[in-house]
Image (cartoon, rainbow, N blue to C red):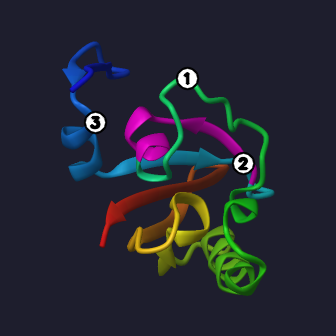
Amino acid sequence: MPKIEAAEGETLSPVALSKQPGTAHLDETGRMRRLDTAFLMHLGFAPGDDLVGLPFSCLWLHEARDGINSALRAARAGIAMRRDLALDYLLGDGAGHCTAILQPDGDGIRVTLRAA
């Protein structure tokens, strides 16, 4: 199994990354500005993929976006929110779910993804 260089300088396997939470920092509009390797791996992206500038909500089916957008609004208002999100749209049928925790973080929002 290939090894992936983590942001902190440690080397982790994709299996280890899938078991640890992934983190992204969004700006006040909900656009991604920093993502760690584990966050990308949870969503099926390669470690070098660049999602910076994309709205976080664009990763999900239109049916799920109302829930994501309401969680983003709550986080902007200072309230932490948790959402269960299907990964089938990104990773194929049977991919399961992840839990996204959205919370205020300075002038933006921190999103933590955990395998469900």
| Amino acid type assigned to the residue bearing label 2 in the image | Asp
Identify the residue at image location x=73%, y=78%: 65
Q: Which residue is more in the foreground, 75 or 42?
A: 42
The quarter of the displayed image where residue 73 is located? bottom right
The residue labelled by disc 3 is 14
Q: Is residue 12 left or right of residue 56?
A: left
- Image point (49%, 42%), residue name: 40
Read off the residue under disc 2: 27
- Vertical placement of residue 98 versus 30, above or below: below
Mark 1 sits on what residue? 48
**Label 3 element class:** helix
Q: In this view, does 102 lie above or below 51?
A: below
Q: How far apart are marks 2 and 1 (CA)?
A: 20 Å
Image coordinates of residue 113 in percent, x first then y, are 41, 59
Q: What residue type is labelled 3?
A: Pro
Residue 61, image x, y percentages? 71, 75
State the SS at label 1. loop
Residue extent of the magenta highlight:
31-41
Check disc 1 and give the amino acid type.
Gly
Mark 2 vs mark 1: give the one in front: 1
Q: Earlier in the sequence, mark 2 or mark 3?
A: 3
Q: Earlier in the sequence, mark 2 or mark 1?
A: 2
The residue that appears at 30% across and 73% down in the rendered structure is: 116
**Image quadrant for the N terminus?**
top left
> Residue extending furthest top?
9
How dense is the environment of label 2, judged by Cα within 10 Å: few (below 14), some, or many (20 and up)? some
Contact, CB < 8 Å: mark 2 with mark 3? Answer: no
